[in-house]
Image: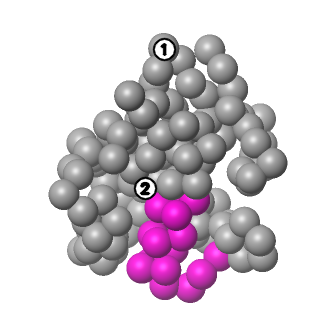
Amino acid sequence: MRIIQTENMLAPNGHYSQCIEHNGILYLSGQLPIDPQTKTIPRTISEQTILVLKNIASILHEAGSDKNNVLQGRIYIPSIKLWDEVNTVYSKFFGTHQPVRCIIPTNELHYGALIEIEVTAILKP
């Protein structure tokens, strides 16, 4: 097991790792839509989804992978009414690659965010 944390990744805010690699599988912690530079959260669900996916892509890059190696995504949103917008942004991000996925409506998310996404991926072959 190898914890992956680089200076280009946001430091975790709690007792967890952003990314762990084990036997070629990457496990990413749930990512909130926090801008790495400003530490702010955008207002709309579309902006938040784009930012979360961008942050995930950055972590995957630092770990030696990319979005085309994502196996599974779990998406947490406070209301199922956000599903369509999230799906639209998610589809544009992944293009023809279709990882398995679930979208889970929850109560409120930390810091008032409208989305949190965690993924499992493989290292680039």
Question: Which residue is painted at 68% across and 32% down in the image?
Answer: 4
Q: From what the image shows, is residue 69 above or below residue 35? A: above
Please, which residue is most extreme toward the front here?
A: 125
The type of residue carrying mark 2 is: Tyr
Please report the bounds of the magenta region as a residue range.
41-55
Q: Is disc 2 placed on a helix, strand or loop?
A: strand
Quarter of the image where the C terminus is located = top left
User: Mark 2 or mark 1, which is nearer the start of the sequence?
Assistant: 1
Question: Which residue is painted at 44% across and 46% down in the image?
Answer: 66
Kindly indicate the quadrant of the structure image that contains residue 75: bottom left
Q: Is disc 1 placed on a helix, strand or loop?
A: loop
* Res. 109 visible in picture: no
The type of residue carrying mark 1 is: Asn
| Front one among 37 and 76 | 37
Q: CA distance from mark 1 to mark 2?
A: 27 Å
| Front one among 91 and 34 | 91
Question: Which residue is painted at 65% across and 76% down in the image?
Answer: 41
| Main SS class of the magenta portion in the image | helix
Label 2 environment density (alpha carbons within 10 Å; few <14, some 14–19, many ≥20): many
Q: Which mark is residue 59?
A: none
Q: Which residue is mark 2?
A: 76
Q: From what the image shows, is residue 56 above or below residue 37? A: above
Q: Which mark is residue 23?
A: 1
Left/right placement of residue 64 relative to residue 85 reads: right
